[in-house]
Amino acid sequence: MIVVKFGGTSVGDAEAIERAADIVKGRLARQPAVVVSALGGATNSLLAIGEQSAKGHLIGALRGVETLRDRHFEQCEKLLGTSSEASDVAGEMSATFDELASLAEALSILGHATPRSFDAIAAFGEQLSSHLVAAFFKVRGIPAEHIDARDVFITDNNFMSAEPQTDAIADNARDVVQPLIQDGKVPVMAGFIGRTTGGITTTLGRGGSDYSASLLGAALHADAIEIWTDVDGMLTADPRVVKGSKLIEQIRFDEASELATFGAKVLHPNTIAPAVRLGIPVFIYNSRNPDGKGTRITFDAPRRAVSAIAGKGGITLVKVGAAKMLFARGFLRRVFEIFEKNGVSVDVVATSEVSVSVTVDDPSGLESLVVDLSSLGDVSVERDRAIVAVVGAAISEDSGAMGRAISALDGIKVHMMSLSATGINLTIIVEGDQLNPALDRLHNAFFGKAKK
C-alpha cells in the first residue's frame, strides 16, 4: 500500500480536487491511503480569525468566518452538485462553521487566546477539506471512506507544535485504517491535526500535513509515500531566486533533510523522519503535472559532491568570547545548557580559540539568553544574517567542491563557516541582503549558468 498526500494547493479548489481524484483513481491497485491539507490559505485565514477574536474584533472575525464559509460552499457546489453526498457534506460543513463562529465569540469575550485555542481553530481547515475530498472521491467512483484523523494521530499536549506518540499512532493505524484498506476502501483523512490522550485537539505545527503522511506511512509500513504539491519536485535551488534550477530526480534522505532544514520550501524538516527510520521511499510530485518524473528520496540515491543549494534569511548570530574559559572543562556544556534553559534552538555552531558562534532563527528569548551568557564571557548579537547551505553527501570528500564554494563567494563578506558533523552540509553565514546573490553564485559554480 501507499500513502498519498495532497497539499493545500493540490486541494485548493474544485479543479485541484478533481486532479487529485484522477491521481488517486490511477493508483487504486496500489491500495492508497489519502492525507489532505486544508484548502490553500485556509489555515492562515483561520488563525487570523482567532487573532481578531482575541483582540475583541468580533465583527471582523465573523466576516472572516463567512468568507471561508462561502468559499467552501462554493467549492462544494461545484464538486458535488445535486449528488446524494452533497446534502450530507453541506450539513457537516454548516455545523463546523457554526462551531467556528461560536468559538470566535467565546474568544472575543475572554479577550485572549491560548495555544490550545489556536489549535482548536486551525484544525477546522483540515476537517472541512477532508470531508469534501472524501465525498467527491465517492462521486468519482473511488471507494473512499472518511476517517477523523484525531482517531489516528495521538500527540502530547504541546499545543501548536504537538509531538506525535508513535506507538499509539501505530496501534490506531492498525485498528482504524488497515481494516479499511484490506476491505478495498480508500481511507481519506486530514493531515496536521491530532488529539491528546484526553481528547483535546492539537496540531503538529507548520508542515504538519506532510509529517502526518510520513507518520501514517511508517505506522502502516507503506511501500511508498507520495507528497503532491505545486512544484515538480526538489530542485537544485529555489527557482524563485535562482534561474535555471534543475530537478533532482533522486536524492538521499540525509541530503533532503538538510535542505529542508536550511530553507528548501518543498519539504518540511520533520516530514521524512518517520520514513527514514523504516527506509520507506518518499516521492514528491506536481499535481498540476502528474506525468512528471518528480523526486525520489531514498537511502540508495547517488552520492554527489553537491546535490543542491539552499538558504534562509532572518538569522541571528550570537558570539560568546571567553579566551580564558573556552578550553576549560565543561565550558561548552555550560554554553548550551544556557541555550536550553532559555528555550533557544541552535542551527549552526562554530568555535575558534577565543569564541563560540551559533546561529538562531527565532530571536524571541534572546534578551534573557544574552544576560545568562554574559556570565561566561563577552557576548555579541548580530542580526539580519542569512545561512547558505551547500548540500551533498560527498562534499567533505571533495576538496575541489569545498574550494569552489569558497571561491564563488569572492567579494561577499562571510561571517562564519561550518561543515556539519555528518560531512554533507557546508553552511556559510553572510549578510542578510547577500543571501540571493550568494545562492545565485554558488548555483552557477556547481550547476552552470541559466541559459538565456
Image: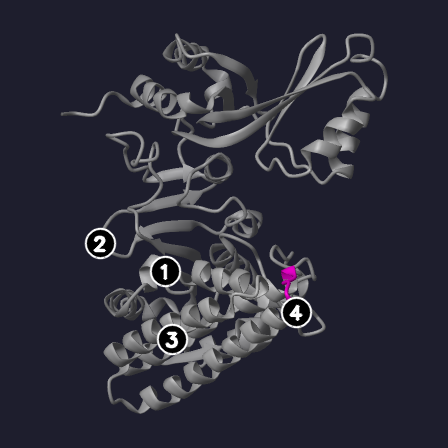
Image coloring type: one colour
| First in residue order: circle 3 vs circle 4 | 3
**x and y percentages locating residue 271 in the rendered image:** 51, 50
Q: Which residue extends farthest right? A: 329
Give the answer, above or below, for where 236 lies relative to 294: above
In this rendered view, identify the residue nearer to me: 305 or 435.
435
**x and y percentages locating residue 323 in the rendered image:** 77, 8
Would you name the residue on which mark 1 appears?
A: 40
Which quarter of the figure has residue 382? Answer: top right
**x and y percentages locating residue 182 in the rendered image:** 46, 77
Q: Amino acid at mark 4?
A: Leu
Would you name the residue on which mark 4 appears?
A: 110
**Of the residues tagged 4 and 1, which is closer to the observer?**
4
Would you name the residue on which mark 2 appears?
A: 291
Extent of the magenta region: 110-115
**How far apart are labels 3 and 2 at the CA level?**
34 Å
**How far apart are labels 1 and 3 at the CA level?**
14 Å
The residue under the point 51% across, 38% down is 261
